[in-house]
């Protein structure tokens, strides 16, 4: 009887430990990302600046749609253009000071007539079923985006 209980406990532990793999966590995050998202706010902080600049006029109202085949579309409301593209969600694991840190990055590339129009590698600060917060490092500074699911 005791050996059956030990065997059951051991199998349950293996199943629980294997269900929390990096691949599983990445798939769960991707499931939350699929669909349409609208920009609610955007700001930019130049390198060396103390405060962010409001960039809502450039981005608020734009829509990004992420599809399950890793393609995407960016609907720019000001230019009245839809840019096709693709995306990839990346999980980065770092071990510093005996801590196991996990960070997610969203790589997005959009094209205009076959040429690159926009490329962002964003840190995912928050991704829930309703909210998406991104931090995009660019040459001159950092963009901060807050999006809401449509």
Image (cartoon, grey):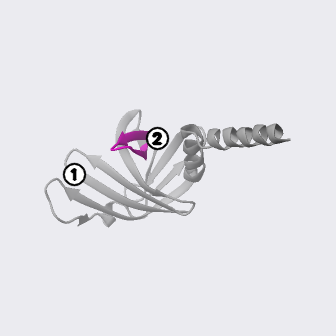
Circle number at residue 21:
none
Residue 105 in magenta stretch: yes
In front of the other: 78 or 69: 69
Q: Is residue 110 visible to us here?
A: no
Disc on the earlier residue, 2 or 1: 2
- Magenta span of residues: 92-106
Residue 74 in percent (x, y) is at: 46, 49
Quadrant of res 5: top right
Q: Evaluate if marks 2 and 1 touch, with contact meaning CB atoms under 8 Å apart.
A: no
Question: From what the image shows, is residue 47 above or below residue 86?
Answer: below
Residue 101 in percent (x, y) is at: 41, 46
At x 25%, y 59%, the residue is 44
Label 2: which secondary element: strand
* Crowding at mark 1 (Cα within 10 Å: few <14, some 14-19, many 20+): some
Q: Is residue 78 visible to us here?
A: yes
Q: Give the residue pinned by disc 2.
A: 91
Quadrant of res 15: top right
Q: In the drawing, does residue 73 fall left or right of residue 53?
A: right
Q: Give the residue pinned by disc 1.
A: 141
* Crowding at mark 2 (Cα within 10 Å: few <14, some 14-19, many 20+): some
Label 2 or label 1, whichever lies nearer to me, is: 2
At x 59%, y 48%, the residue is 28
Residue 97 in magenta stretch: yes
Q: CA distance from mark 2 to mark 1?
A: 23 Å
Label 1: which secondary element: strand
Residue 31 in percent (x, y) is at: 60, 49
């Amino acid at each position: 009887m005791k050996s059956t209980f030990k065997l059951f406990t051991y199998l349950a532990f293996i199943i629980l430990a294997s269900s929390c793999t990096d691949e599983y966590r990445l798939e769960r995050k991707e499931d939350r990302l699929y669909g349409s998202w609208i920009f609610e706010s955007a700001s930019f902080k130049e390198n060396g600046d103390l405060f962010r600049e409001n960039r809502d006029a450039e981005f608020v109202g734009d829509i990004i749609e992420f599809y399950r085949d890793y393609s995407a579309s960016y609907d720019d409301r000001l230019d009245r253009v839809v840019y096709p593209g693709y995306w990839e969600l990346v999980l980065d694991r770092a071990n510093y000071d005996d801590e196991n840190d996990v960070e997610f990055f969203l790589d997005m590339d959009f094209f205009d007539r076959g040429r690159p129009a926009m490329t962002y590698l964003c840190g995912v600060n928050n991704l829930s079923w309703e909210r998406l917060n991104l931090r995009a490092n660019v040459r001159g500074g950092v963009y901060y985006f807050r999006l809401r699911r449509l």
